[in-house]
Image (cartoon, helix red, strand yellow):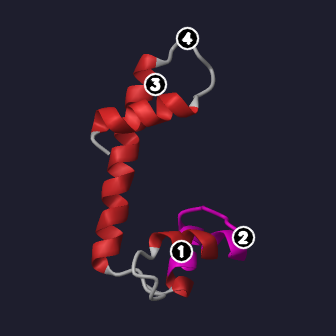
Amino acid sequence: MTFPSFKHGLDLLGLRLSEEEAKELFTYLDGKKDGILDHDEFCDILEERRLMKKVKANHDLSSTTQSTTTDQQVRSSFEETGF
């Protein structure tokens, strides 16, 4: 997927990022840094998102007394989910 396709997809999903923000995200996700998100990179993104959902669910269950997340809580959640 090229950047224009990626940006269009973000727009369709209602994620209104500026051009600069979208490029920064695309560059971050483009593991090979070749200007194209390929199937493997896309699958890696989906796997990371799945793990992030686990982290959030774990955090939501364990932090009912706190309203903010500390760096240590995030690290612990990542470790607990095997990330």
Image disc number at residue 68: none
Residue picked out by circle 1: 26
Q: CA distance from mark 2 to mark 4?
A: 35 Å
Q: Answer with mark 2 or mark 4, whichever residue precedes in sequence.
A: 2
The magenta span reads 6-22
Residue 17 in which image quadrant? bottom right
Under circle 1, the secondary element is: helix
| Front position in the image: 83 or 57 | 83
Q: CA distance from mark 2 to mark 1?
A: 12 Å
Q: Is residue 20 above or below residue 82?
A: below
Name the spot of residue 32 as percent of width and height, x first. Answer: 39, 81
Query: Which quarter of the rendered picture does the N terminus lie within?
Result: bottom left
In the rendered view, does 61 fall on the left or right side of 18?
left
Q: How dense is the environment of label 2, judged by Cα within 10 Å: few (below 14), some, or many (20 and up)?
A: few
Q: Answer with mark 2 or mark 1, whichever residue precedes in sequence.
A: 2
Residue picked out by circle 4: 65
Q: Answer with mark 4 or mark 3, whichever residue precedes in sequence.
A: 3
Residue picked out by circle 2: 18
Q: The residue under label 2 is which amino acid type? A: Ser
Q: Are discs 1 and 4 less than 8 Å apart at CB?
A: no
- Whether 11 is among the magenta residues is yes
Q: Answer with mark 1 or mark 4, whichever residue precedes in sequence.
A: 1
Under circle 3, the secondary element is: helix
Q: CA distance from mark 3 to mark 2?
A: 30 Å
Name the spot of residue 39 as percent of width and height, x first. Answer: 29, 78
Q: The residue under label 1 is which amino acid type? A: Phe
Residue pictured at 33% horizontal, 49% vertical: 50
Under circle 2, the secondary element is: loop
Image disc number at residue 60: 3
Q: The residue under label 4 is which amino acid type? A: Thr
Query: Which quarter of the rendered picture does the C terminus lie within?
Result: top left
| Callout count | 4
